[in-house]
């Protein structure tokens, strides 16, 4: 098959981790006889510098014309501490999500047996965790009306959801739960927020269509606590934009390394794949960043956008091998272990994939 993939390396460590992910995808394409055309686009701080726009039109066109999008990271400390700035890298990300209609952010949380000791949480609590967050990504307080009143001394942000927006995300949650452990948790704050009451009401009205799925309704504050106390009790969790943002960062602690967690943002037409870690500017251009989350995001791309399970599987198996053999970057190598560079980890994976028998 031939694929057109948009690549948006972005800022900070984005370009370095993306480079290794592209190499890994090319290796997979080679052994399975696919051809990938990579189309590069600017996004984030680097796009502001070159085009004065964090999500230029040209980048949007490249994304729209692609079969899938591979994304690095955005954000630059230059833009962080000046509240008066009108253009920020993060706006590019939000605009891209909205314009491409990437309404469902899929964030899996699972543990790697060889990394179980990296998590600050107790082994017995986290071992065997396998849950998926479905975070609504194009609505809620991120996109509601906001502004200032009272000469700038009062500020407001609005959380707004339509039933339709909730249904399309939750439907995906039910379908996923049916294929997994058949448990769905609706995370909300229905004891306080009207928008949460609509979420809960909507999920309740959909229950009858999925009789095999057991649904629980939990408040977001309680989930924040239970998630790290009993992560194994959860299977699929559906939630609105901001709650999902916060809880998925929390969930990454379970895995022991943010450097490993991939994600997918599903849209009607195209979908985007990105690591959940940020641009980590302190590590940029040093060839030390962990490329595995971006590489595992590419594995999600093969499976979710192209329906290619074997291609996805070979990436996951090879990443597992690199962890077991401790061919890892310094965030995972520990005191005594050898610190491999970003590109050396890529070298190992590419070599393993090219020499594997399929
Ligand atoms: C994420 C990030 C973004 C978000 C920021 C960079 C706007 O934290 O993808 O989780 O809040 O959605
Ligand atoms: Mn976040």
Image (cartoon, grey):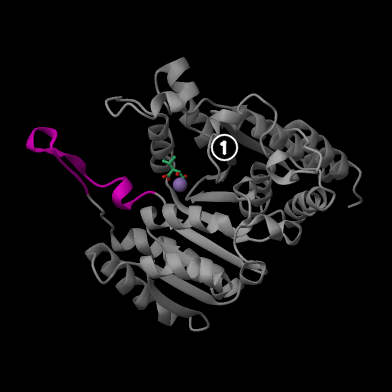
Residue 130 image offset from top left, x and y in percent: 62, 66
Question: Range of the magenta residues?
Answer: 138-157
Q: In the figure, is residue 42 to the left or right of 170? A: right
Residue visible at 43% across and 64% down in the picture = 224
Residue visible at 59% across and 42% down in the picture = 68
Q: Which residue is mark 1?
A: 71
Q: In the figure, is residue 84 to the left or right of 123? A: left
Extreme residue toward the left, this view: 150
Give whichever of 102, 81 is nearer the camera. Answer: 81
Residue 136 seen: no
Could you say whether the residue bearing mark 1 is in a helix, strand or loop? Answer: strand
Is residue 153 inside the magenta stretch? yes
Q: Is mark 1 within 8 Å of ligand 1?
A: no
Give whichever of 298, 302 is nearer the camera. Answer: 298
Q: In the figure, is residue 57 to the left or right of 178? A: left
Is 306 drawn above or below residue 338 in the view shown?
Answer: below
Residue visible at 39% across and 73% down in the picture = 218
Say few, some or many: other residues with alpha carbon within 10 Å of mark 1 (under 14 / 14 to 19 / 20 or more): many
Residue 80 image offset from top left, x and y in percent: 39, 30
Residue 357 image offset from top left, x and y in percent: 92, 51
Quadrant in which ligand 1 is drawn: top left
């Amino acid at each position: 098959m031939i694929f057109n993939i948009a690549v948006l390396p972005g800022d900070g460590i984005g370009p370095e981790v993306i480079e290794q992910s592209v190499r890994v995808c090319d290796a997979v394409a080679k052994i399975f006889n696919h051809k990938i055309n990579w189309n590069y686009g600017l996004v984030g701080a680097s796009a502001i510098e070159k085009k004065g726009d964090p999500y230029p039109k040209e980048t949007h066109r490249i994304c729209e014309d692609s079969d899938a999008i591979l994304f690095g990271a955005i954000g630059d400390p230059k833009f962080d501490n000046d509240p008066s700035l009108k253009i920020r890298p993060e706006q590019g990300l939000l605009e891209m999500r909205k314009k491409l209609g990437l309404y469902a952010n899929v964030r899996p949380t699972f543990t790697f047996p060889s990394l179980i000791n990296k998590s600050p949480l107790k082994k017995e609590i986290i071992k065997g965790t396998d849950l998926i967050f479905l975070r609504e990504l194009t609505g809620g307080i991120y996109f509601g009306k906001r502004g200032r009143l009272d000469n700038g001394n009062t500020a407001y942000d609005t959380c707004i959801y339509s039933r339709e927006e909730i249904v399309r995300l939750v439907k995906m949650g039910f379908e996923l739960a049916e294929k997994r452990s058949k448990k769905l948790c609706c995370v909300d704050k229905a004891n306080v927020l009207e928008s949460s009451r609509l979420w809960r009401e909507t999920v309740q009205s959909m229950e009858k269509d999925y009789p095999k799925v057991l649904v629980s309704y939990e408040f977001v504050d309680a989930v924040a606590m239970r998630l790290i106390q009993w992560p194994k009790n959860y299977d699929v969790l559906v939630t609105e934009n901001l709650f999902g943002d916060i809880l998925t960062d929390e969930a990454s602690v379970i895995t022991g390394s943010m450097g490993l967690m991939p994600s997918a943002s599903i849209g009607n037409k195209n979908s985007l794949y990105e690591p959940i870690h940020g641009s980590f500017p302190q590590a940029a251009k040093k060839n030390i960043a962990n490329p595995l989350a971006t590489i595992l995001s590419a594995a999600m791309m093969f499976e979710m956008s192209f329906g290619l399970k074997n291609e996805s599987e070979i990436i996951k198996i090879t990443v597992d091998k690199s962890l077991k053999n401790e061919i890892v970057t310094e965030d995972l190598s520990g005191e005594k272990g050898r610190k491999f560079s970003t590109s050396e980890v890529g070298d190992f994976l590419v070599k393993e994939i090219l020499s594997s028998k399929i």
